[in-house]
Image (cartoon, rainbow, N blue to C red):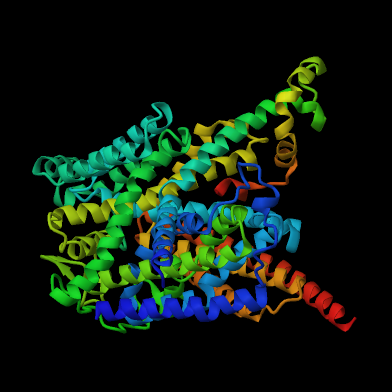
Amino acid sequence: MAAIVLIVAIAIVVIGYQAYAAKMDKEVIQANPKKATPATLYNDGVDFMPASGSVLFGYQFKSIAALGPIVGPIVAVQWGWLPTFLWLMLGVFFIGWVQDYASAMMAMRNDGLTMGGLAYKFISPRARGILLAFLYFYLLLIMGAFGAVVAGLLAIPVVPVGLFILTLAGVLAGQMTYRWKMDLVMTTVITVLIALIGIWLGTMPWAKNLVNSINSLAGTGPKHILYNTPYGPMTWPQFFWGIVALAFCYLGSVLAIWRFAQPVNYVSFWFVALGLLGSILGVFVAAIFKTTNVAFQIPAYVTWNQPKLGWLWPILFVTVSCGAISGWHSLVSTAGTARQLEKETDALPVGAGAMFTEAILATMALIFAATALTKGNTVLYDANHMYFLKVKAGAIWAYGMSRFLSWIPGISPSMGAAIGAIFLAVMALTVMQLVLRFMRVASAELVGDKIPAFKNPHVGTIVAILFTFLILWTAFWQRIWVLFGGANQLFAGLALLLITIWLANEGKKHGWVFWPMVFMYVTTVTALLVTAWKSFRHMMTANISAAFAFGDLVAGVIALFLALAAVILAYDGFKSLAKARAKAASHAGN
Amino acid sequence: MTEEEKRSFFSKIVRNLQDVIYGMASHDMARQALKTRGSMEHLFILITMGDLLGVPILPPYYSLRLLPYVVPQISTWKRRMLRERDLTDALA
């Protein structure tokens, strides 16, 4: 079944790209390879710089693929694998690629403006301000949602030692490349080997004992529970490893990029790429040689109303997150890719191609989740209680990789799990470092004049980390994930709104962007309002712990703020759209 | 397909694959390094040639002495300094 699902996904992706995306590119957008792009017009060797389509495809894919396409389907299969798969495929076919590709084209045809500048130009000055405030909360939710996943991964005994040595190998790579000016191939071979040995060392009994002893510092069994929430306990390992994850991000945020963030990401990349390739091949190997179970254990359809999360619509649509569509991609497409595209015709393979490829990654996560209900004696999804996810989402991915990599000689289940967990942790930490760096810049820009302390990079970073801790330690993670997904998909709706206005201004056909935008807007605003209502209702529950009540309050307020900001932006946006349509009609009349 | 066409076809595939791997693994790293260098250079030009943008920092005598070395970069520097930007620029 797994191989069939993967083949169907690949077929849909190919048809979507060749039939739909290519048609829109040719007939509506009319990408012209002879037209000068901002990269060639304003080539300053810094922000604007032409690069080949193949390089940019790799850059775009690496920038957009993080935890969203992996964790989203793992959480969403609680409603059943079929609705999750359908939304992944329909979402990417009709909406996902549209946003990624068209936002790059929009930025390219508007002098390389980023989302803030485009909102200012096409909607109003107020829209830009609201968009930036929206963005800060959106990024905070990324920190909370991803941080909890990383904390869960680090609590797995085979992970921390390997990740620590991989980090050291990354720092060494930076030193070898930038200070010692060594050959990149030599640097890569040495540091990747060190990291590989580190991951192997992490699976040794002494390393596992070390991590286990840290995990039981506050006691074992019920003693390591710090406090209870209505959804489950906050455990010492989750608490402690959350601090470690954010300390890692702190270094990535305040140290020079070449010193820490970039070389660590570079060394990690090889594990991510090879792990992914090995897993995709592993699905087919498993289907043919039965190396692991590939039959789906979770039913195609479980329920409409998942008791802990909510209704299939709208909550599943925001839970799946980046595999179908993601607002993050529009930020990458406008601020990064659009300023480097050498030819307009490269936007299709780069923007749409990378999005379609990400949908395949999300399908892999769906397969990993749907094919295992238990791991030994550990229940992963509880078949007796609506297939409720019983472990951290990251553990499902790590277990999946350990199963689907087992066909490679020398990869033991323990080693496979370590590679899978480090794969996911690295993907999350890469984005978290970037987000924290951005939040630091944002706070300096927004309040630095009134509170000069925020201009100090350490203060801005620490404040953002404290906000993240508030979410990590007080909130119900799956609700934070839904909130993150809501903000993420809503940001995509905002990008689609901007694209619609741009196309209307140009007098081009825009229904193919307008209706997905309406769908995304209605779905995500409803999801946010439902989440706010649930959070406030739980806050009023009798005998609730203070920490969790506070978490509910934070989640509810953020959800309400995001929904309100989106409604104001929609109001301003629709006024601009009406003007653009009127202008286009008068031009047509003349 | 002739032998030469076959060779060119496969070499194109290999080159594209190399580019994709470079894009995933190193392009961002190279871009950040260039950004850092570019920002330092532009800061230096601002200190020495600030007059061009109405920011008088260095006495004109020294600016004129340095001018020949800075001329090739002045147009891109001015465009970068005066370009409207906001927070979303910091993301990529």
Say which residue appears at 51% left-offset and 71% top-offset.
A96
Q: Quadrant of residue A304?
A: bottom left
Between A153 and A163, which is closer to the camera in this rendering? A163
Query: Residue A563, can we see it?
Result: no
State left or right for residue B78 relative to residue A424: right
Residue A54 percent location from the top left of the image: 48, 58
Q: Quadrant of the C terminus of chain A?
A: bottom right
Residue A208 percent location from the top left of the image: 14, 44
State left or right for residue A465 relative to residue A134: left
Between A38 and B39, which is closer to the camera in this rendering? A38
Say which residue appears at 86% left-offset and 77% top-offset.
A587
Q: Quadrant of residue A181?
A: top left
Furthest-right residue in view?
A: A590
State left or right for residue A143 relative to residue A410: right
Residue B73 percent location from the top left of the image: 70, 34
Q: Quadrant of the N terminus of chain A?
A: bottom left
Marks counted in the figure total 0
